[in-house]
Amino acid sequence: MESIVDSFTDLDTSQKVLYVVGGIVASTVSVVGLRKLCFKQKAKEYPRDTVILHQIGRGPYAPSMTPFAVKLETYLRMARIPYQNVHGLKMSSKGKVPWIEYNGKAVADSTLCIDFLNEKLEVDLHQHLSPRDKGAAMAMQVMTEEHLYWFLAVFRYQYDNDKTFIKQTLKIGWFVVRIAKYMVAKSTWYQGLGRHTEEEVTQMFKKELQALSDFMGERKFLMGDEPCESDCAVFGQLSQLYWHFLGTGHENLIRDKYPNLAAYCNRMKETFWPDWDQCITHGGTKEATK
Ligand SMILES: N[C@@H](CCC(=O)N[C@@H](CS)C(=O)NCC(=O)O)C(=O)O
């Protein structure tokens, strides 16, 4: 009978790679599963009445590479809610980051986290707005979070052909890059943006930034002289476009074409992030990246 070694030797290279990778994945899953079964994990003890903010590590030029983490942390600062960061790759029950824990209760999704805290701690950062302005603030928030965000995804992961963003900014291994690229391509296809050409997408991107810039005008914050809850979301998204490189061939539109949006980014940074330079890994950049 043919030995296992002989059978393995007869396989072609791609089959061998598949077997080895499959073996590694299967053993890792078994070891992790066994550990979970055999060793009862001690629940982490966090201080009471403190929001535990689970998010990935700090970003190179802005406090996170995830706009939703910048949003949530800015909200916690704006609402003056005591919080503690836990940086890592632990995802929420919905499979995303960021998320929070508060007195033992876990809440997923940045917007639902904010709604939860608003109710629990009686916070209302929109209270100074008229109903019409509240509606406009929400419309701008949704435009940036649910649409502008996807431009970021395609520019970062699909159009950055020489992988400058991934190599220089993200600094993650090729395997993780491949997974991220695959997942983003799938998501943007279903979202719709991934079906357009790069030229069409760039045109749409500029139009949306123009709309935001026109809406903002010379106001200090999104809705006037006072910041509101939606500023957290808008700033979260713009922080990526302004401070985090989009990839070769893509100019920093906010810095070069929309000085009011650039001034807004800097104003939000100065108002809510006096410790910005300690919250970024690059060690203190005064200017947005190219
Ligand atoms: N609606 C969510 C969006 C969060 C989100 O999309 N996070 C991304 C990182 S920017 C994520 O965790 N992606 C992982 C995945 O989709 O598997 C929120 O507001 O928290």
Image (cartoon, rainbow, N blue to C red):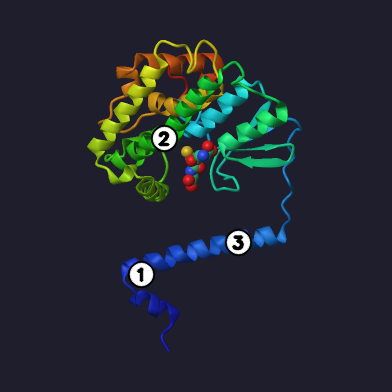
Quick check: 230 left or right of 162?
right
Which residue is painted at 30% across and 18% down in the image? 256
Quadrant showing the C terminus: top left
Q: Residue 40 occupies which quadrant of the picture? A: bottom right
Sooner in the amino-acid sequence: mark 3 or mark 2: 3
Label 1 secondary element: helix
Q: Is residue 116 visible?
A: yes
- Amino acid at circle 2: Tyr
Residue 161: x %, y % from top left = 27, 41
Please report whichever mark, 1 or 3, sits nearer to the chain's N-terminal start: 1
Relative vertical location of residue 113 with respect to residue 265 in this rendering, above or below: below
Quadrant (top left, top right, bottom left, bottom right) of the N terminus:
bottom left
* Label 1 residue near ligand 1, CB within 8 Å: no
Residue located at (55% from left, 43% from top): 89
- The residue tagged with tag 2: helix, strand or loop? helix
Residue at image mark 1: 15
Q: CA distance from mark 1 to mark 3?
A: 24 Å
Q: Which residue is mark 2?
A: 149
Task: Give the farthest residue toward the bottom.
Answer: 1
- Disc nearest the viewer among 1 and 2: 2
Reading the image, the residue beneath label 3 is 31
Q: Position of residue 55 (x, y in %)?
A: 56, 37
Q: Marks 1 and 2, Cα distance to the nearest angstrom? A: 38 Å
| Residue contact at pointers 1 and 2, CB within 8 angstroms | no
- Front disc: 3 or 2: 2
Q: Is ligand 1 less than 8 Å from the beta carbon at label 2? A: yes
Asked if the residues shown at circle 3 and circle 2 are in contact, with their CB atoms under 8 angstroms apart, the answer is: no
Mark 1 surroundings: few (<14), some (14-19) or many (≥20) residues within 10 A: few
User: Is the C-beta of the residue carrying label 3 under 8 Å from the nearest atom of ligand 1?
Assistant: no
